[in-house]
Protein backbone atom coordinates (compact mmCIF):
# COMPACT_ATOMS: atom_id res chain seq x y z
CA UNK A 1 0.00 0.00 0.00
CA UNK A 2 2.87 2.38 0.81
CA UNK A 3 4.42 1.70 -2.59
CA UNK A 4 1.12 2.43 -4.37
CA UNK A 5 0.78 5.69 -2.44
CA UNK A 6 4.35 6.66 -3.35
CA UNK A 7 3.81 6.28 -7.10
CA UNK A 8 0.16 7.34 -7.20
CA UNK A 9 0.74 10.34 -9.56
CA UNK A 10 2.57 8.11 -12.04
CA UNK A 11 -0.22 5.53 -11.90
CA UNK A 12 -2.96 8.11 -12.43
CA UNK A 13 -1.12 9.68 -15.37
CA UNK A 14 -0.54 6.24 -16.86
CA UNK A 15 -4.27 5.50 -16.67
CA UNK A 16 -5.04 8.94 -18.15
CA UNK A 17 -2.67 8.29 -21.05
CA UNK A 18 -4.35 4.94 -21.71
CA UNK A 19 -7.77 6.63 -21.60
CA UNK A 20 -6.82 9.32 -24.13
CA UNK A 21 -5.13 6.73 -26.34
CA UNK A 22 -8.41 4.80 -26.39
CA UNK A 23 -10.36 7.99 -27.16
CA UNK A 24 -8.01 8.66 -30.06
CA UNK A 25 -8.42 5.13 -31.43
CA UNK A 26 -12.22 5.29 -31.30
CA UNK A 27 -12.48 8.94 -32.41
CA UNK A 28 -14.15 10.17 -29.22
CA UNK A 29 -14.58 13.96 -29.46
CA UNK A 30 -17.43 14.95 -27.15
CA UNK A 31 -16.61 16.37 -23.67
CA UNK A 32 -12.89 15.79 -24.23
CA UNK A 33 -11.87 18.91 -22.29
CA UNK A 34 -13.97 17.87 -19.28
CA UNK A 35 -12.33 14.45 -19.26
CA UNK A 36 -8.90 16.06 -19.49
CA UNK A 37 -9.59 18.45 -16.59
CA UNK A 38 -10.89 15.56 -14.48
CA UNK A 39 -7.80 13.42 -15.13
CA UNK A 40 -5.44 16.37 -14.50
CA UNK A 41 -7.23 17.18 -11.24
CA UNK A 42 -6.95 13.51 -10.22
CA UNK A 43 -3.20 13.58 -10.96
CA UNK A 44 -2.76 16.71 -8.84
CA UNK A 45 -4.75 15.17 -5.99
CA UNK A 46 -2.61 12.03 -6.28
CA UNK A 47 0.53 14.17 -6.01
CA UNK A 48 -0.83 15.78 -2.84
CA UNK A 49 -1.63 12.36 -1.33
CA UNK A 50 1.82 11.00 -2.21
CA UNK A 51 3.78 13.90 -0.69
CA UNK A 52 4.91 11.75 2.24
CA UNK A 53 5.58 8.68 0.08
CA UNK A 54 9.01 7.05 -0.01
CA UNK A 55 10.18 4.19 -2.21
CA UNK A 56 12.96 3.03 -4.53
CA UNK A 57 12.58 1.15 -7.81
CA UNK A 58 14.84 -0.56 -10.33
CA UNK A 59 17.67 -1.11 -7.84
CA UNK A 60 17.66 2.54 -6.83
CA UNK A 61 17.56 4.02 -10.35
CA UNK A 62 14.23 5.71 -9.57
CA UNK A 63 13.53 7.19 -6.17
CA UNK A 64 10.40 8.63 -4.60
CA UNK A 65 11.21 11.06 -1.80
CA UNK A 66 10.45 14.62 -0.70
CA UNK A 67 12.59 15.99 -3.54
CA UNK A 68 10.77 14.17 -6.35
CA UNK A 69 7.36 14.73 -4.73
CA UNK A 70 8.04 18.48 -4.46
CA UNK A 71 8.40 18.65 -8.22
CA UNK A 72 5.58 16.19 -8.93
CA UNK A 73 3.24 18.47 -6.96
CA UNK A 74 4.08 21.53 -9.07
CA UNK A 75 4.30 19.60 -12.34
CA UNK A 76 0.83 18.09 -11.88
CA UNK A 77 -0.50 21.45 -10.66
CA UNK A 78 0.93 23.12 -13.76
CA UNK A 79 -0.50 20.31 -15.88
CA UNK A 80 -3.97 20.99 -14.45
CA UNK A 81 -3.71 24.71 -15.24
CA UNK A 82 -2.35 24.00 -18.73
CA UNK A 83 -5.27 21.63 -19.41
CA UNK A 84 -7.79 24.22 -18.18
CA UNK A 85 -6.22 26.71 -20.59
CA UNK A 86 -6.85 24.34 -23.54
CA UNK A 87 -10.62 24.80 -23.27
CA UNK A 88 -11.09 26.19 -26.77
CA UNK A 89 -8.09 24.90 -28.75
CA UNK A 90 -8.90 27.34 -31.54
CA UNK A 91 -6.09 26.24 -33.85
CA UNK A 92 -6.20 22.49 -33.22
CA UNK A 93 -8.63 20.31 -35.15
CA UNK A 94 -11.35 18.78 -32.99
CA UNK A 95 -10.49 15.28 -34.24
CA UNK A 96 -6.92 15.67 -32.92
CA UNK A 97 -7.72 16.82 -29.39
CA UNK A 98 -7.58 13.36 -27.83
CA UNK A 99 -4.14 12.97 -29.43
CA UNK A 100 -2.97 16.26 -27.95
CA UNK A 101 -4.19 15.33 -24.47
CA UNK A 102 -2.52 11.93 -24.79
CA UNK A 103 0.84 13.46 -25.70
CA UNK A 104 0.65 16.15 -23.01
CA UNK A 105 -0.17 13.47 -20.42
CA UNK A 106 2.77 11.30 -21.50
CA UNK A 107 5.06 14.34 -21.42
CA UNK A 108 3.90 15.16 -17.89
CA UNK A 109 4.64 11.58 -16.84
CA UNK A 110 8.14 11.93 -18.26
CA UNK A 111 8.72 15.19 -16.39
CA UNK A 112 7.78 13.52 -13.10
CA UNK A 113 10.10 10.61 -13.90
CA UNK A 114 12.91 13.12 -14.50
CA UNK A 115 12.53 14.50 -10.98
CA UNK A 116 12.90 11.04 -9.43
CA UNK A 117 15.65 9.54 -11.59
CA UNK A 118 18.91 8.90 -9.70
CA UNK A 119 20.76 7.11 -12.49
CA UNK A 120 21.94 8.84 -15.66
CA UNK A 121 20.45 6.43 -18.22
CA UNK A 122 17.13 6.43 -16.37
CA UNK A 123 17.31 10.22 -16.37
CA UNK A 124 18.02 10.21 -20.09
CA UNK A 125 15.06 7.91 -20.86
CA UNK A 126 12.75 10.05 -18.71
CA UNK A 127 13.87 13.15 -20.60
CA UNK A 128 13.07 11.51 -23.92
CA UNK A 129 9.62 10.44 -22.66
CA UNK A 130 8.94 14.06 -21.72
CA UNK A 131 10.40 15.58 -24.90
CA UNK A 132 9.17 13.57 -27.87
CA UNK A 133 5.45 14.15 -27.21
CA UNK A 134 6.14 17.90 -27.29
CA UNK A 135 7.97 17.61 -30.62
CA UNK A 136 4.82 15.99 -32.02
CA UNK A 137 2.23 18.31 -30.46
CA UNK A 138 4.12 21.35 -31.78
CA UNK A 139 2.97 20.33 -35.27
CA UNK A 140 -0.71 19.97 -34.24
CA UNK A 141 -2.01 23.22 -35.65
CA UNK A 142 -4.46 23.92 -38.45
CA UNK A 143 -3.22 25.56 -41.65
CA UNK A 144 -0.43 28.11 -41.73
CA UNK A 145 2.59 25.78 -42.13
CA UNK A 146 4.72 27.54 -39.51
CA UNK A 147 3.97 24.72 -37.10
CA UNK A 148 5.95 22.22 -39.19
CA UNK A 149 8.99 24.49 -39.24
CA UNK A 150 8.68 24.94 -35.46
CA UNK A 151 8.32 21.18 -34.89
CA UNK A 152 11.30 20.44 -37.15
CA UNK A 153 13.53 22.93 -35.31
CA UNK A 154 12.35 21.64 -31.94
CA UNK A 155 13.11 18.07 -33.01
CA UNK A 156 16.52 18.83 -34.55
CA UNK A 157 17.76 20.85 -31.58
CA UNK A 158 16.30 18.22 -29.25
CA UNK A 159 18.15 15.42 -31.05
CA UNK A 160 21.40 17.39 -30.85
CA UNK A 161 20.96 17.92 -27.11
CA UNK A 162 20.13 14.22 -26.76
CA UNK A 163 23.34 13.30 -28.56
CA UNK A 164 25.36 15.60 -26.30
CA UNK A 165 23.85 14.08 -23.17
CA UNK A 166 24.33 10.46 -24.24
CA UNK A 167 27.95 11.16 -25.22
CA UNK A 168 28.46 12.82 -21.85
CA UNK A 169 26.97 9.84 -20.03
CA UNK A 170 29.24 7.43 -21.94
CA UNK A 171 32.33 9.47 -21.00
CA UNK A 172 31.26 9.63 -17.36
CA UNK A 173 30.66 5.89 -17.25
CA UNK A 174 34.05 5.25 -18.84
CA UNK A 175 35.81 7.51 -16.34
CA UNK A 176 33.88 6.75 -13.15
CA UNK A 177 32.63 3.22 -13.72
CA UNK A 178 29.01 3.93 -12.80
CA UNK A 179 25.96 5.87 -13.94
CA UNK A 180 24.38 6.04 -10.47
CA UNK A 181 24.58 9.52 -8.96
CA UNK A 182 25.46 8.19 -5.51
CA UNK A 183 28.49 6.37 -6.95
CA UNK A 184 29.45 9.42 -9.02
CA UNK A 185 29.43 11.61 -5.90
CA UNK A 186 31.83 9.21 -4.18
CA UNK A 187 34.13 8.76 -7.19
CA UNK A 188 34.22 12.35 -8.44
CA UNK A 189 36.72 13.89 -5.94
CA UNK A 190 39.52 11.64 -7.21
CA UNK A 191 38.72 12.44 -10.87
CA UNK A 192 38.47 16.23 -10.79
CA UNK A 193 41.52 16.61 -13.05
CA UNK A 194 40.66 13.75 -15.37
CA UNK A 195 40.05 15.15 -18.91
CA UNK A 196 37.65 12.31 -19.73
CA UNK A 197 35.46 13.15 -16.74
CA UNK A 198 35.51 16.87 -17.53
CA UNK A 199 34.47 16.28 -21.15
CA UNK A 200 31.63 14.04 -19.95
CA UNK A 201 30.40 16.65 -17.49
CA UNK A 202 30.55 19.46 -20.08
CA UNK A 203 28.61 17.45 -22.68
CA UNK A 204 25.99 16.38 -20.14
CA UNK A 205 25.55 19.93 -18.82
CA UNK A 206 25.21 21.22 -22.40
CA UNK A 207 22.21 18.94 -22.84
CA UNK A 208 20.70 20.28 -19.62
CA UNK A 209 21.17 23.88 -20.79
CA UNK A 210 19.08 23.07 -23.87
CA UNK A 211 16.22 21.89 -21.66
CA UNK A 212 16.42 25.17 -19.75
CA UNK A 213 16.61 27.22 -23.01
CA UNK A 214 19.70 29.01 -21.72
CA UNK A 215 22.17 30.81 -24.00
CA UNK A 216 23.55 29.59 -26.43
CA UNK A 217 21.07 26.69 -26.57
CA UNK A 218 18.00 28.93 -26.85
CA UNK A 219 17.61 29.28 -30.62
CA UNK A 220 14.73 26.82 -30.81
CA UNK A 221 12.54 28.66 -28.30
CA UNK A 222 11.32 31.74 -30.27
CA UNK A 223 10.34 29.75 -33.36
CA UNK A 224 8.67 26.99 -31.36
CA UNK A 225 6.74 29.49 -29.24
CA UNK A 226 5.70 31.39 -32.35
CA UNK A 227 4.81 28.43 -34.57
CA UNK A 228 2.99 26.08 -32.21
CA UNK A 229 -0.58 26.45 -31.01
CA UNK A 230 -0.59 28.80 -28.03
CA UNK A 231 -2.23 26.16 -25.79
CA UNK A 232 0.69 23.80 -26.44
CA UNK A 233 3.18 26.61 -25.86
CA UNK A 234 1.61 27.33 -22.46
CA UNK A 235 2.50 23.78 -21.41
CA UNK A 236 5.94 23.73 -23.06
CA UNK A 237 6.95 27.10 -21.61
CA UNK A 238 6.25 26.25 -17.97
CA UNK A 239 6.45 22.57 -17.10
CA UNK A 240 9.75 21.51 -18.73
CA UNK A 241 11.42 24.39 -16.84
CA UNK A 242 10.43 22.71 -13.58
CA UNK A 243 12.03 19.46 -14.71
CA UNK A 244 15.14 21.37 -15.81
CA UNK A 245 15.43 22.93 -12.33
CA UNK A 246 15.06 19.44 -10.81
CA UNK A 247 17.84 18.22 -13.10
CA UNK A 248 20.19 21.04 -12.15
CA UNK A 249 19.40 20.63 -8.46
CA UNK A 250 20.04 16.89 -8.60
CA UNK A 251 23.03 16.87 -10.96
CA UNK A 252 24.39 20.43 -11.14
CA UNK A 253 25.46 20.59 -7.51
CA UNK A 254 27.37 17.33 -7.95
CA UNK A 255 29.45 18.65 -10.85
CA UNK A 256 30.17 22.15 -9.54
CA UNK A 257 33.47 21.01 -7.95
CA UNK A 258 35.18 21.37 -11.33
CA UNK A 259 37.21 24.59 -11.41
CA UNK A 260 36.42 25.23 -15.07
CA UNK A 261 32.69 24.63 -14.87
CA UNK A 262 31.64 27.36 -12.42
CA UNK A 263 33.16 30.32 -14.36
CA UNK A 264 31.72 28.95 -17.62
CA UNK A 265 28.28 28.62 -16.04
CA UNK A 266 28.56 32.17 -14.66
CA UNK A 267 29.29 33.53 -18.14
CA UNK A 268 26.36 31.60 -19.62
CA UNK A 269 24.07 32.87 -16.85
CA UNK A 270 25.03 36.48 -17.57
CA UNK A 271 24.74 36.02 -21.34
CA UNK A 272 21.32 34.36 -20.96
CA UNK A 273 20.02 37.28 -18.89
CA UNK A 274 21.48 39.92 -21.20
CA UNK A 275 20.73 38.38 -24.60
CA UNK A 276 17.23 37.38 -23.52
CA UNK A 277 16.33 40.88 -22.34
CA UNK A 278 17.90 42.70 -25.31
CA UNK A 279 16.13 40.50 -27.86
CA UNK A 280 12.85 40.74 -25.92
CA UNK A 281 13.05 44.53 -26.19
CA UNK A 282 12.98 44.28 -29.98
CA UNK A 283 9.86 42.07 -30.16
CA UNK A 284 6.43 43.26 -31.23
CA UNK A 285 4.73 39.85 -30.87
CA UNK A 286 3.76 38.43 -27.49
CA UNK A 287 4.76 34.77 -27.86
CA UNK A 288 8.25 35.55 -29.20
CA UNK A 289 8.69 38.13 -26.45
CA UNK A 290 7.82 35.54 -23.80
CA UNK A 291 10.26 33.11 -25.44
CA UNK A 292 13.16 35.54 -25.05
CA UNK A 293 11.92 36.34 -21.56
CA UNK A 294 12.28 32.62 -20.75
CA UNK A 295 15.92 32.77 -21.88
CA UNK A 296 16.53 35.67 -19.52
CA UNK A 297 14.93 33.89 -16.57
CA UNK A 298 17.02 30.79 -17.28
CA UNK A 299 20.04 32.96 -16.51
CA UNK A 300 18.72 33.77 -13.05
CA UNK A 301 18.08 30.08 -12.34
CA UNK A 302 21.70 29.33 -13.31
CA UNK A 303 22.80 31.79 -10.61
CA UNK A 304 21.19 29.46 -8.08
CA UNK A 305 23.21 26.51 -9.41
CA UNK A 306 26.38 28.63 -9.16
CA UNK A 307 25.63 29.41 -5.52
CA UNK A 308 24.74 25.83 -4.56
CA UNK A 309 26.84 26.07 -1.39
CA UNK A 310 24.99 29.19 -0.18
CA UNK A 311 21.38 28.09 -0.50
CA UNK A 312 21.29 28.75 -4.23
CA UNK A 313 19.63 25.45 -5.11
CA UNK A 314 16.87 26.13 -2.60
CA UNK A 315 16.34 29.55 -4.21
CA UNK A 316 16.43 28.03 -7.70
CA UNK A 317 13.73 25.52 -6.73
CA UNK A 318 11.59 28.35 -5.34
CA UNK A 319 12.11 30.43 -8.47
CA UNK A 320 11.41 27.48 -10.77
CA UNK A 321 8.02 26.95 -9.14
CA UNK A 322 7.29 30.69 -9.23
CA UNK A 323 8.34 30.95 -12.89
CA UNK A 324 5.89 28.18 -13.80
CA UNK A 325 3.07 30.17 -12.17
CA UNK A 326 4.14 33.43 -13.86
CA UNK A 327 4.41 31.77 -17.26
CA UNK A 328 1.06 29.99 -17.01
CA UNK A 329 -0.64 33.22 -15.91
CA UNK A 330 0.80 35.12 -18.88
CA UNK A 331 -0.11 32.38 -21.37
CA UNK A 332 -3.61 32.03 -19.95
CA UNK A 333 -4.22 35.58 -21.14
CA UNK A 334 -2.35 34.95 -24.40
CA UNK A 335 -4.65 32.00 -25.18
CA UNK A 336 -7.71 34.21 -24.75
CA UNK A 337 -6.18 36.95 -26.91
CA UNK A 338 -5.17 34.62 -29.75
CA UNK A 339 -7.38 34.70 -32.82
CA UNK A 340 -8.13 31.57 -34.81
CA UNK A 341 -6.01 31.24 -37.94
CA UNK A 342 -3.46 33.87 -36.91
CA UNK A 343 0.14 32.85 -36.35
CA UNK A 344 0.97 35.51 -33.80
CA UNK A 345 -0.35 37.81 -31.08
CA UNK A 346 0.85 41.36 -31.87
CA UNK A 347 1.33 43.55 -28.82
CA UNK A 348 -1.06 46.03 -30.40
CA UNK A 349 -3.83 43.43 -29.99
CA UNK A 350 -3.52 43.95 -26.23
CA UNK A 351 -4.75 47.55 -26.48
CA UNK A 352 -7.78 48.17 -24.36
CA UNK A 353 -7.53 44.83 -22.56
CA UNK A 354 -8.59 46.59 -19.35
CA UNK A 355 -11.91 47.53 -20.99
CA UNK A 356 -12.46 44.18 -22.72
CA UNK A 357 -11.55 41.82 -19.85
CA UNK A 358 -10.72 43.57 -16.55
CA UNK A 359 -9.97 40.36 -14.63
CA UNK A 360 -7.57 39.09 -17.29
CA UNK A 361 -5.93 42.52 -17.45
CA UNK A 362 -5.30 42.49 -13.68
CA UNK A 363 -3.88 38.94 -13.68
CA UNK A 364 -1.77 39.71 -16.76
CA UNK A 365 -0.38 42.80 -15.03
CA UNK A 366 0.48 40.81 -11.89
CA UNK A 367 2.25 38.18 -14.02
CA UNK A 368 4.24 40.82 -15.91
CA UNK A 369 5.16 42.70 -12.73
CA UNK A 370 6.36 39.39 -11.29
CA UNK A 371 8.35 38.59 -14.43
CA UNK A 372 9.93 42.03 -14.12
CA UNK A 373 10.91 41.24 -10.53
CA UNK A 374 9.02 44.03 -8.80
CA UNK A 375 7.56 43.85 -5.27
CA UNK A 376 5.28 42.64 -3.81
CA UNK A 377 5.22 39.70 -6.23
CA UNK A 378 6.89 36.30 -6.00
CA UNK A 379 9.16 37.18 -8.92
CA UNK A 380 10.81 39.89 -6.81
CA UNK A 381 11.29 37.53 -3.86
CA UNK A 382 12.73 34.80 -6.09
CA UNK A 383 15.20 37.10 -7.82
CA UNK A 384 16.25 38.62 -4.50
CA UNK A 385 16.94 35.15 -3.09
CA UNK A 386 18.97 34.11 -6.14
CA UNK A 387 21.02 37.32 -6.24
CA UNK A 388 21.64 37.15 -2.48
CA UNK A 389 22.86 33.55 -2.75
CA UNK A 390 25.17 34.46 -5.64
CA UNK A 391 26.55 37.41 -3.65
CA UNK A 392 27.25 35.20 -0.63
CA UNK A 393 29.00 32.70 -2.90
CA UNK A 394 31.35 35.44 -4.13
CA UNK A 395 29.92 35.93 -7.62
CA UNK A 396 29.70 39.70 -7.20
CA UNK A 397 30.01 40.62 -10.88
CA UNK A 398 27.14 38.30 -11.84
CA UNK A 399 24.95 39.96 -9.20
CA UNK A 400 25.72 43.43 -10.56
CA UNK A 401 24.87 42.34 -14.11
CA UNK A 402 21.77 40.54 -12.81
CA UNK A 403 20.51 43.74 -11.18
CA UNK A 404 21.20 45.72 -14.37
CA UNK A 405 19.30 43.12 -16.36
CA UNK A 406 16.37 43.42 -13.97
CA UNK A 407 16.30 47.14 -14.76
CA UNK A 408 16.49 46.36 -18.48
CA UNK A 409 13.64 43.89 -18.10
CA UNK A 410 11.46 46.67 -16.67
CA UNK A 411 11.34 48.29 -20.13
CA UNK A 412 10.19 44.99 -21.65
CA UNK A 413 7.33 44.30 -19.27
CA UNK A 414 6.21 47.84 -18.42
CA UNK A 415 5.74 48.53 -22.12
CA UNK A 416 3.26 45.63 -22.34
CA UNK A 417 1.49 46.84 -19.19
CA UNK A 418 1.24 50.33 -20.71
CA UNK A 419 -0.34 48.94 -23.87
CA UNK A 420 -2.89 46.75 -22.07
CA UNK A 421 -3.82 49.10 -19.19
CA UNK A 422 -3.00 52.70 -20.00
CA UNK A 423 -3.91 52.77 -23.68
CA UNK A 424 -7.58 53.71 -23.95
CA UNK A 425 -7.88 52.71 -27.56
CA UNK A 426 -9.79 49.43 -27.44
CA UNK A 427 -9.07 47.38 -30.54
CA UNK A 428 -10.43 44.03 -31.60
CA UNK A 429 -13.09 41.73 -30.26
CA UNK A 430 -14.41 41.31 -26.71
CA UNK A 431 -12.47 38.77 -24.65
CA UNK A 432 -14.79 36.32 -22.85
CA UNK A 433 -13.72 34.90 -19.49
CA UNK A 434 -15.48 31.59 -18.71
CA UNK A 435 -15.97 30.88 -14.97
CA UNK A 436 -13.36 28.08 -14.72
CA UNK A 437 -10.80 30.16 -16.60
CA UNK A 438 -11.56 33.23 -14.47
CA UNK A 439 -11.19 31.21 -11.26
CA UNK A 440 -7.88 29.78 -12.47
CA UNK A 441 -6.60 33.22 -13.46
CA UNK A 442 -7.57 34.62 -10.05
CA UNK A 443 -5.81 31.75 -8.26
CA UNK A 444 -2.61 32.30 -10.28
CA UNK A 445 -2.62 36.06 -9.65
CA UNK A 446 -3.28 35.67 -5.93
CA UNK A 447 -0.64 32.95 -5.75
CA UNK A 448 2.02 35.29 -7.12
CA UNK A 449 1.08 37.96 -4.57
CA UNK A 450 0.87 35.58 -1.61
CA UNK A 451 4.21 33.92 -2.45
CA UNK A 452 5.75 37.36 -2.81
CA UNK A 453 4.66 38.51 0.64
CA UNK A 454 4.76 35.14 2.44
CA UNK A 455 7.41 32.99 0.72
CA UNK A 456 8.24 31.01 3.86
CA UNK A 457 5.94 28.05 3.21
CA UNK A 458 7.28 27.32 -0.27
CA UNK A 459 10.88 27.93 0.83
CA UNK A 460 10.43 25.46 3.69
CA UNK A 461 9.03 22.88 1.26
CA UNK A 462 12.00 23.42 -1.07
CA UNK A 463 14.47 23.19 1.82
CA UNK A 464 13.01 19.91 3.06
CA UNK A 465 12.98 18.56 -0.49
CA UNK A 466 16.62 19.49 -0.94
CA UNK A 467 17.52 17.89 2.39
CA UNK A 468 16.27 14.57 1.01
CA UNK A 469 18.64 14.99 -1.92
CA UNK A 470 21.94 15.97 -0.31
CA UNK A 471 23.17 13.29 -0.97
CA UNK A 472 21.09 11.12 -0.67
CA UNK A 473 19.37 10.56 2.66
CA UNK A 474 18.63 6.83 3.12
CA UNK A 475 14.92 6.06 2.98
CA UNK A 476 13.46 4.96 6.30
Image (cartoon, rainbow, N blue to C red):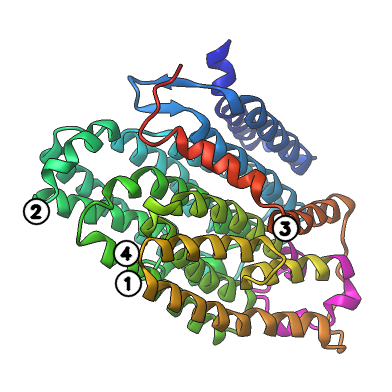
Question: Observer-nearest residue: 378 or 219?
Answer: 378
- Give the residue displayed 56% in from the left and 13% down from the top: 2
Mark 1 or mark 2: name the one nearer the start of the chain: 2
Say whether residue 119 is left or right of residue 73: left
Locate residue 465, reporting x and y percent. Answer: 51, 37
> Element type at marker 1?
helix
Q: Which residue is mark 1?
A: 267
Q: Is residue 442 above or below residue 384?
A: above
Local secondary structure at mark 2: helix
Q: CA distance from mark 4 to mark 1?
A: 5 Å
Q: Mark 3, mark 4: which one is toward the viewer?
A: 3
Q: What residue would you read off at disc 3?
A: 453
Q: Which residues are magenta?
A: 332-359
If you read the primary sequence from the N terminus, does the residue marked by circle 3 or circle 4 appear first? 4
Q: Earlier in the sequence, mark 3 or mark 2?
A: 2
Q: Which mark is residue 195?
A: 2
Q: Element under label 3?
A: helix
Q: Marks 1 and 2, Cα distance to the nearest angstrom?
A: 21 Å
Decide which of tag 1 and tag 3 comes sooner along the chain: 1
Q: Badge 1, how many Cα within 10 Å: few under 14, some, many 20+?
A: some
Q: Quadrant of residue 37?
A: top right
Task: Give the residue at mark 4.
Answer: 265
Do callouts 4 and 1 mark residues in contact (Cβ within 8 Å)? Answer: yes
Amino acid sequence: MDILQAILPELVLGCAAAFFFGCSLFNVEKNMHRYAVAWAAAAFLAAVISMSGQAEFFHGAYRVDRFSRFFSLFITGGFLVAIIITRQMKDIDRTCRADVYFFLTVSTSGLILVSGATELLTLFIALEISSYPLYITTSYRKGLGFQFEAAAKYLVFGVVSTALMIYGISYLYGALGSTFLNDIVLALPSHLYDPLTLVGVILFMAGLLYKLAAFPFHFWAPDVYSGAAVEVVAFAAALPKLAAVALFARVGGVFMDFDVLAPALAILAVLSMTVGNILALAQTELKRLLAYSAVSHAGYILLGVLAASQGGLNSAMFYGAVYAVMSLAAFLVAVQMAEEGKNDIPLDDLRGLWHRAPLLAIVFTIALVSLAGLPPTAGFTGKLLLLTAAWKAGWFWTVVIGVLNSLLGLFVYLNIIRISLVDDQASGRPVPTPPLLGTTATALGLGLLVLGVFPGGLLTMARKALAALLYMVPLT
